[in-house]
Amino acid sequence: MRALSALAAVLALCANAGAAVHRVAPGASIADAIRAAAPGDTVRIEHGDYAERLVIDKPLTLEGIGRPTVRGGFSGDVIRVRAADVTIRGLIVRDSGTDQTAQNSGIYLEPGSHRATVQDCDIVYNLFGVWVEKADDARVQRNIITGRRDLQSTLRGNGVQLYNSAGAQVLDNHISYARDGIYVDLSRKSVFRGNRIHHLRYGTHYMNTHDSVWENNEVYMNRGGLALMEVRRLTVRNNVAWGNTDHGIMLRTIQDSVVENNVVAGNGRGFFIYDAEYNTLHANLVVNNEVGVHLSAGSSNNKIDGNDFIGNQNQVKFVAARDVEWGKSQGNYWSNYSGWDQNGDGKGDVPYEANDVVDRLNWQYPLLKLVLSSPSVQTLRFVARQFPVLRAPSVVDKHPRTRPLNQDWRKWSDKRPHRGE
C-alpha cells in the first residue's frame, strides 16, 4: 500500500509538471483558451470584462488574476461544468438568465462533475448562484453570492443549491438577497461551516440530507433562519441565528441529532420544534425571542438540558395532552423562574412550569390576548396555580438552574425580529 501511495504521488507530480498555463488577456476569448487546454492545464484570465458563456468539459483550473468579470448576457448559465476535477477561482461571475425551469445559474455543476472547487469568487446578479447536481465532494468556499435583489423573492433562485450529492463542503461564504441562502435536498455527509447568510426567505432550506454538520454559521435578518427538516444524525453547533422574522432554528421531523452551543436571539420563535424525537439540545442560548421554543406535533423523547432561556416574551409555546420533562440531568435556566434555592446548590427547589391554563387558552384562542390584563383572567391564573385540577399540561423542569451558563448573554439582548426584506 505504501508503494502504491508513493507511485500515485509521483504520477501526480509528473502530471502537474506537464500542465500548461494558458493566459487570456482582455479582448481574447476564454472559451478558445478552454478548447485549447489539455486536461490538467490552467486557464489564467487577466483583469478585464469578458462577455462570454463558458462550458468546461475537461479537468482544468479557471483562475482569475485581479478579479476579471465574466458576464453571461442574461441568458442561460454563465459557467457550466461538465467534467470532474475542475477548479474555478478568483472571478466575478454575473448576469445569468432568469429561467427557473432551466435552473439558470452563475456556475452550474452538472451530474458527474465530482471534486469541483468554486473558490474566492463574486457570484452576483444571477438567478441561482452555484448549482451542484449529482456531483460528489464539491467545495464551495469563500465566495460572495448575491442574488437578483430587483426580483420578488419567489422569482429568485437560491444562493447555493445542492441536490443528490455527497461529501459537499460549503464553507465561509457570504450569501444574501437570493430566495433561500443554501438549499439542500437528497444529499448526504456534507459540511456547512462559517457561512454568513442574510436577507433571504430561509437562510437554509435543508431536507433529506443525513449525517451532516452545520456549524459556526451566522444566519440573520431573514424570514426564517436554519430550516432543518426530515433528517437524521445531524450535528448543529456554534451557530448564531438572530433577527429572523419567523424562527431562528427550525427542527422539523428530525431524529438522532445533536443541537448544541447555538445562540438564537431576537427571532419571532427561537426554536420551532415540530415532530422531532430522540434529539439532544444542549448549552444553547435562547434569548429575547417573542417565543423561546414553539414545541408541537408530538415532539417528545428529546433531551433538552443545560440551556439558557432568557428574556423571551413567552418562554415556551406548548399545547399537548401531557407534560414533557426537560432538564433531567443538568437543568435549564429560566429567567422568569420564581422559585428558590434554599440549600445553595444552584438548582431550584420547586419545579419550573413553562405554561399554565391561561397560556394554553391563549395559544388556542388568540383573541384572548385582548383581555390578558383583565382582573378576571389574572384571577383565573391565580386559581389555576392554587388548584392542580385546573392545571394545564406543560414543559416541566423539576430542578431548574438558578444561574445561566452563558455569562455573555447580555450582548444579544437588543436583537429584534427583522420585519423588512
Image (spheres, rainbow, N blue to C red):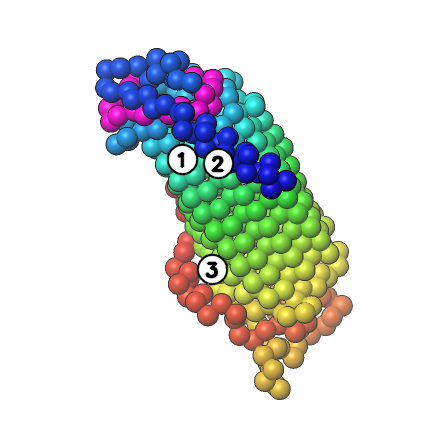
Q: Dividing the image into 4 quarters, which one contains the N terminus?
A: top right
Residue drawn at (39%, 17%), measured in percent from left and top?
37
Location of mark 2 (residue): 139
Where residue 20 appears, as percent x and y from the top left, is 36, 23
Q: Choose the circle earlier in sequence order: 1 or 3.
A: 1
Q: CA distance from mark 2 to mark 3?
A: 36 Å
Asked if one can make out residue 269 in the rendered structure from this viewpoint, the answer is: no
- Pointer 1 with pointer 2, Cβ within 8 A: yes
Q: Secondary structure at mark 1?
A: strand
Where residue 124 appears, as percent x and y from the top left, is 35, 30
Location of mark 1 (residue): 119
* Residue toward you, 366 or 71: 71
First to last magenta residue range? 39-61
Location of mark 3 (residue): 288
Task: State whether residue 66 is above or below residue 282.
Answer: above
Q: Position of 31 compared to 368: left or right?
A: left
